[in-house]
Amino acid sequence: MDGDAGLFTPDSVTWQMHGDPMMWVAGIRALYLQALHPRAVRGVLENSDFRRDAWGRLMRTAHFVGTTTYGTSEAAERAGARIRKIHSMLGATDPDTGERYGVDEPDLLLWVHCAEIDSYLHVVRRSGFPLTDAQADRYLAEHRVSARLVGLDPAEVPGDRAELAAYFEQVRPLLAAGADARVVDDFLLRPPTHPLLVPAREVLWRRVADLAYAALPPYAHALYGRPAPEPAVVTRRLRATGTLLRCVPARLRWQLPPKHILRAMARLGPDARPAPYKVGR
């Protein structure tokens, strides 16, 4: 391969896994999980117009993930610097104490990071993407790089499944489904849309949001107070959805914005094409 392979490179688990279409379902699960941290979700509500620009927010997140995964090292570092600069200028007010705090506090950045990476790994793997436990640990270790990009000390970030599980156990007493989390929940179930598209929203988006919610851990279901199907049922639904989406030709899927995978393949050559079978090579 010629050219800059980026921060992860085609040899990483991340490079192969992030090309999977179930990443979109995983991203919605991450939003549900992140909203359970009162200070983190307050920071989003005070500084984001996601309720008016849902698609724009999702695409900006996809652009960041795509750039850091498949872009050049320089592009990834620029994206990280931009995120750090934006976060450094933003603050929010604690809903319980009235304390003013910065959204770039390390504990908040760590929560957002762990909820996101856990969601990607959990949903994609549970939907049938083949990863061994060792490869799952390798994926988490790789994302100490993305943690650094948003301003975290990589040494303080969980680098395997055991460390990630211990982190979630530690942070669980801080989680709650308060009024702000309810706003996010309602938004994800019924995002604003043109009246003519409401039927499509109910048929398509609602099913995706329900599946993402169902894939949350049991303690999240308990906090939100909405039941979910039995785990075996959720796994079957995730596998069926993954199988269906993976039937869509990859090059057709990758035509959707922001096209980072196609750009990476043009830069590095056809061997850079992401594929599940390449993970163990």
Image: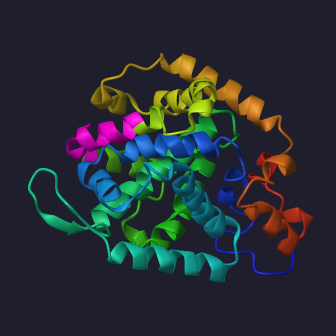
Q: Relative to 91, is 158 above or below?
A: above
Quadrant of image for the N terminus: bottom right
Q: Which x, y percent locates residue 170?
A: 26, 48
Location of residue 151 (image quadrant):
bottom left
Q: Which x, y percent locates residue 102?
A: 25, 70
Q: Is residue 174 magenta?
A: yes
* Residue occupying the point 47% across, 59% down: 159
Location of residue 257 (image quadrant):
bottom right
Location of residue 185 (image quadrant):
top left
* Residue occupying the point 46% across, 51% down: 52
In the picture, measured across the screen, residue 128 lies left or right of residue 100, that is: right
Residues drawn in magenta: 171-186
Q: Relative to 128, is 19 above or below?
A: below
Q: Relative to 27, is 72 above or below?
A: below
Q: Is residue 255 magenta?
A: no
Colour setting: rainbow
